[in-house]
């Protein structure tokens, strides 16, 4: 049981460093064209990065229960499920922000007088643009194009990791690490790089704040976590609820 906040932060640091170590091992292996084993190391790195993120959250005061933390520390599937969900949300968010970059910049550059009203109008335009885009076939098509492969990757991550390490016999065929293609490795490299870098950026964002700003940020994160947990409890079958 990890009861010390300091130990959680230390663990988070060690885990993100280990994630980067696995990541570098993968790159070295790819240089000798061992793409299967390299892909498996990328997935190990992602698992360590997700572990790091939740140790860090616990360390800054987010009230994760010990059972929840243990699931993330000692089980691979919860890390893949959570990692996939967070990855998709941020990927779509950044894509939408990029589409509306001009409008966002105008809203950010407005100066007094009339700043509140002008920003309100600018952000109303953002909402209108989002609603218009969301109702179009091209918007839905683009979301599907981005999201479906990523969801599939996370759902199959554990199997891909095993297939990159071991020779096995599945569905009347032999599976071997040497059968994994370079393009599969490169797609995994992109996902793994995004996950590790975004987690590190999150740490930097929190730590670059003043003490007052950091306390406000953590307080808001606690509120959002409690809301999410409450929603989760209402939807979870009674027999599976935690004590």
Image (cartoon, rainbow, N blue to C red):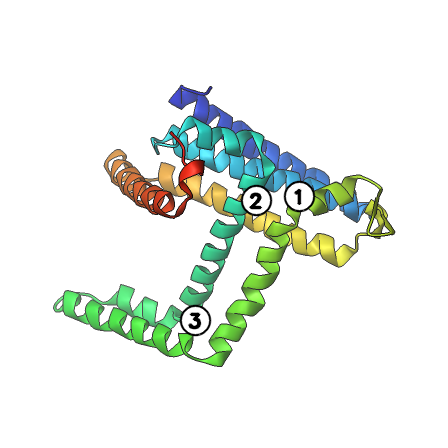
Can you tell which of label 2 and label 3 is closer to the viewer? 2
Whether residue 27 is visible, yes or no, is: no
Residue identified by numbered label 1: 158
Q: Which mark is residue 99?
A: 3
**Marks 2 and 3, Cα distance to the nearest angstrom?**
28 Å
Can you tell which of label 3 and label 1 is closer to the viewer? 1
Q: Position of residue 14 (x, y in %)?
A: 54, 27
Q: Secondary structure at mark 2?
A: helix
Residue identified by numbered label 2: 80
Question: Badge 3: how crowded within 10 Å, few (<14), some, or many (20+)?
Answer: few
Locate residue 79 relative to residue 210 in the image: left or right. Answer: right
**Marks 3 and 1, Cα distance to the nearest angstrom?**
34 Å
Q: Position of residue 103 (x, y in %)?
A: 33, 72
The image quadrant that residue 58 belongs to is top left
Q: Which mark is residue 50?
A: none
| Pointer 1 or 2: first along the chain | 2
Q: Are marks 3 and 1 in contact (CB under 8 Å)?
A: no
Q: Secondary structure at mark 3?
A: helix
* Quarter placement of the C terminus: top left
Q: Position of residue 108 (x, y in %)?
A: 28, 64
Q: Are marks 1 and 2 in contact (CB under 8 Å)?
A: yes
Seen at 49% across and 58% down, the residue is 91
Question: Badge 2: how crowded within 10 Å, few (<14), some, or many (20+)?
Answer: many
Q: Secondary structure at mark 1?
A: helix
Seen at 54% across and 68% down, the residue is 144
Locate residue 38 relative to residue 17 in the image: left or right. Answer: right
């Amino acid at each position: 049981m990890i009861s010390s906040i300091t130990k959680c932060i230390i663990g988070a640091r060690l885990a993100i460093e280990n994630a980067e170590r696995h990541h570098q091992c993968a790159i070295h292996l790819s240089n000798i064209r061992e793409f299967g084993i390299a892909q498996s190391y990328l997935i190990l790195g992602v698992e360590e990065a997700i572990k790091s993120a939740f140790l860090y959250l616990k360390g800054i005061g987010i009230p994760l229960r010990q059972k929840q933390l243990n699931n993330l520390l000692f089980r691979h599937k919860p890390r893949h499920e959570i990692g996939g969900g967070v990855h998709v949300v941020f990927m779509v968010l950044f894509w939408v922000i990029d589409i509306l970059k001009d409008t966002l910049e105008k809203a950010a550059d407005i100066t007094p007088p009339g700043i509140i009203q002008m920003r309100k109008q600018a952000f109303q335009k953002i909402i209108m643009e989002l609603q218009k885009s969301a109702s179009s076939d091209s918007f839905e098509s683009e979301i599907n194009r981005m999201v479906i492969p990523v969801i599939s990757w996370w759902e199959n991550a554990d199997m891909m990791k095993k297939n990159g390490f071991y020779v096995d016999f599945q569905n009347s065929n032999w599976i071997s690490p040497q059968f994994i293609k370079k393009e599969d490795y490169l797609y995994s490299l992109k996902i793994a790089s995004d996950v590790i870098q975004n987690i590190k950026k999150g740490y930097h964002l929190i730590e670059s704040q003043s003490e007052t700003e950091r306390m406000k940020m953590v307080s808001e994160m606690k509120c959002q976590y409690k809301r999410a947990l409450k929603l989760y409890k209402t939807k979870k079958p009674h027999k599976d609820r935690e004590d």
